[in-house]
Image (cartoon, rainbow, N blue to C red):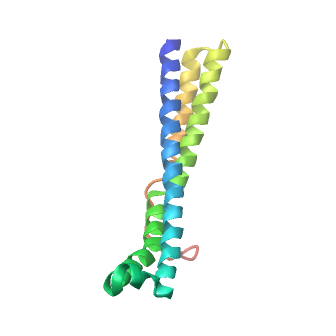
Amino acid sequence: MIGSFEKDLKRIIKDGQRWARRNYFLAHSIFIISVFGSFTASILASGELGKEFLGEQWNQVTTAFLAALPGLMLLLNNTLRFEERAKWQWRKVRLAERYYRQVRDTGQGVSELSMRFSEESEKLESEWPAFGSSPVQPSKPGS
């Protein structure tokens, strides 16, 4: 029984680390793309550089696309919430690591540890950052 719970914890740790790194990478990639798009659009819009390399028509299209990137990336990041999901995954990994060490290092009963881990996991699951929603106008208390 110890082996099964221990294997579950190892799998949760491994999968959680993978997902946390992916979400962290995506959050930072979106930030970099946003800054790059804004910077490049500014360069293309401010001078003749884009016209020389892209031609008049493609310079306008490219500039418009790059100018739209920061807003699109902000919308994507606010909707998918990659950074919040990375933090949540790391919390889950730390929880599983804590229980893994207890199984490995102490003589506590596996059934008790498993039950406590399940309870804490349920609490953590309820805090999962769901997809974002469109901004709403805050309402006054009591209305």
Tell me where residue 38 appears, x and y as whole percent: 51, 75
Give the residue at x 47% y 85%. 45
Give the residue at x 38% y 76%. 65
Instruction: Pick the residue in front: 131 or 30.
Output: 30
Tell me where residue 70 appears, x and y as whole percent: 48, 72
Tell me where residue 136 appears, x and y as whole percent: 47, 73
The correct choice, above or below, for 139 with respect to 106 in the image is: below
Tell me where residue 62 appears, x and y as whole percent: 37, 77
Give the residue at x 37% y 84%. 60
The correct choice, above or below, for 16 with respect to 27 in the image is: above
Q: Can residue 135 be seen in this snapshot?
A: no
The correct choice, above or below, for 75 with respect to 123 in the image is: below
Report the side of 98 relative to 4 (left or right): right
Residue at the limit of the structure toward the right, as seen here: 106
Q: Can residue 140 be seen in this snapshot?
A: yes
Residue at the limit of the structure toward the front, as seen here: 52
Report the side of 112 relative to 75 (left or right): right
